[in-house]
Amino acid sequence: MNSDIDEVITLLNSDKVMKQLPVFWSIENKQCKSLLDFVYKDDEAKKIKIYDLKVTSRPALSFDKTYLKDDHAIQASFYVDALKYWYKDYDISFAFVVVSYTEDMVILFDVSDKALDIGRYGKDFTTHRYMGYLERIEALDYINIQGDYIYPYYVVKKNKKLLIDDNTANNKDSDN
């Protein structure tokens, strides 16, 4: 293990860290609950760091490749926003501590503000739209009110069309 991860493991095992912290909060008139694995709070510096533990059989170095596919982007931004609800004047950051038990490896992945924004607001990619948690809340409201479960929310509500790409046969969004 490298010294950075040794320091994180020491910190996470210290009494300076809150473990399994439940956070009750609301967004867009929705009651929410988050259960954070580890939270380090420095009141003097007005900083909070959230650490989420992920144990996997996959190679630890591949974690960033599945960040969106496994919805870790949503989890990270949701947890940060949960604490921002209560600690508005704190700088809040997020990291995943990824443990690969098949490789006996531990890697720390800090999550950038840009990556947090993708989990929060979503992002358009060439072949698809990744919906952030705010848009998913909006989609769930739409589905519950309209009872429309057949067509994708972004096609109906966002006036998008699905296109077939003749090179890849993947669906992608279009405004045309």
Image (cartoon, rainbow, N blue to C red):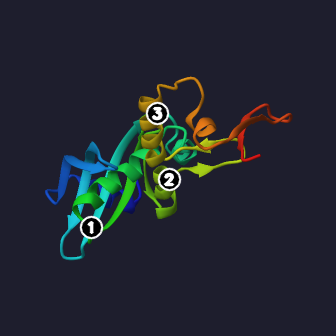
Q: Residue furthest top?
A: 150
| Sooner in the amino-acid sequence: mark 3 or mark 2 | 3
Give the residue number, with chain letter if any, for mark 1.
Answer: 88
Look at label 3 and name its amino acid: Thr
Asked whether the viewer can see residue 96, the reply is no
State yes or no: discs 3 and 2 in contact (Cβ < 8 Å): no
| Sooner in the amino-acid sequence: mark 1 or mark 2 | 1
Q: Disc count in the image?
A: 3
The residues tagged by marks 3 and 2 sit, at their Cα atoms, a distance apart of 34 Å
Residue 133: percent from left, percent from top: 44, 45
Pair 3/2: label in front: 2
Of residues 87 and 138, which is closer to you in this image?
138
Give the residue number, with chain letter if any, for mark 2.
Answer: 121
Disc 2 residue crowd, few under 14, some 14–19, many 20+, Cα 10 Å: some
Tag 2's secondary structure?
Answer: helix
Look at label 2 and name its amino acid: Tyr
Specify whether 137 is left or right of 148: left
The residues tagged by marks 3 and 1 sit, at their Cα atoms, a distance apart of 40 Å
Tag 3's secondary structure?
Answer: loop
Q: Identify the mark at residue 102; answer none if there is no mark.
A: 3
Specify whether 35 is left or right of 28: left
State yes or no: discs 3 and 1 in contact (Cβ < 8 Å): no
